[in-house]
Image: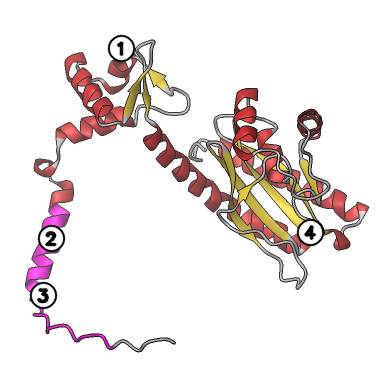
Amino acid sequence: MAKIVQKESAPPRRRRPRWAAEESQKSLETAGTDERYHSRTIERALDVLESFDANQPGMSLKELTAKTHLPESTLFRILLTLQKRGYLQQQEDGTYQLARKVLLGRVYDSAETLRLLVRPHLEELASQFNETASLAYLFGNYVQVLDTVETFHQIRVTNRRGRILPPHCSSMGKVIVAFQPSEVTDSMLEVYGLTRRTERSIVDRQALRQELERVRQQGFACDREESMLGGICFGAPVISATGQIVAAVSVSSPVQRMTPEREKAIQQKVIATAQTVSRKLQQPVARQV
């Protein structure tokens, strides 16, 4: 039985004079523009971290010196400190790379940027076909649903943000894993395993390799009741600004509403949507994803 809890009344708070609040705000604004309040050391360390990007994931001391314009002695101390605190890693060849905890932050930042970019396109897909449209993203060894727009049909295929997709029997999972380097593909399949979700799931390695090759050739993937009986889904890959395929868009529908003509129309629109998003990511104004 629920309990009724009476919240104790807090002691009366003294009101802060308006002039004091205004002075405090003015001080904060001044601190934001006054060089006296800046930490040059922290600023230099951030300059070093921000020097790394997808095009230059690893750099030597000489390359970092040229990019940051810092003296080697100063830069060396910053690198040692960042390495000691786990923000940088030094490789066997002497180059430096961002540590995993920094890279993960960048991945989530890129994923959110992509989600905002793709959201109107998902709404358009869902509206055109009156079916569920979704976006998935590759986080390390797993594919996760990043966003979804569901139809209002009483009978529908649902999706949920944050859901981990099976790489071998979901359309977005297959289309993302199909375009990864072989070692990444093997790692993803090893982590998830070839679990049978329905009697249509592909659980044989050789058969899955053939399926992924078919996905690469046709440019989209199908899930024909492989992850859920009664559901069919088509997914197409999104190419990032760096030329990598780390995301996919899809449309899902109950099998009972699918016809050959409707199936073809959905496939074409999903591919076109993924290509439109990819082109936007190639534009200089778009952030790298």
Left or right of 181 on screen, residue 216 = right
State which mark lies toward you, 1 or 3: 1
Mark 4, residue position: 253
Q: Amino acid at mark 1?
A: Lys
Mark 1, residue position: 62
Q: Is residue 16 magenta?
A: yes
Q: Is residue 27 magenta?
A: yes
Q: Earlier in the sequence, mark 1 or mark 4?
A: 1
Q: Mark 1 to mark 3: distance in Å?
A: 54 Å
Q: Are marks 4 and 3 in contact (CB under 8 Å)?
A: no
Q: Earlier in the sequence, mark 1 or mark 3?
A: 3
Q: Amino acid at mark 2?
A: Lys
Q: Residue drawn at (51%, 45%), measured in percent from left and top?
A: 111
Q: Mark 3 to mark 2: distance in Å?
A: 12 Å
Q: Residue drawn at (72%, 63%), measured in percent from left and top?
A: 127
Q: Earlier in the sequence, mark 1 or mark 2?
A: 2
Residue 75 percent location from the top left of the image: 22, 20
Residue 276 percent location from the top left of the image: 67, 43
Q: Earlier in the sequence, mark 3 or mark 2?
A: 3
| Label 3 crowd (10 A; few <14 / some 14-19 / many >=20) | few
Q: Are marks 1 and 2 in contact (CB under 8 Å)?
A: no
Q: Mark 1 to mark 4: distance in Å?
A: 55 Å
Residue 281 percent location from the top left of the image: 57, 39
Mark 2, residue position: 26
Place residue 177 in its image quadrant.
top right
| Magenta span | 6-30
Left or right of 98 on screen, residue 252 = right
Mark 3, residue position: 18
| Label 1 crowd (10 A; few <14 / some 14-19 / many >=20) | few
Q: Mark 2 to mark 4: distance in Å?
A: 56 Å
Q: Amino acid at mark 3?
A: Arg
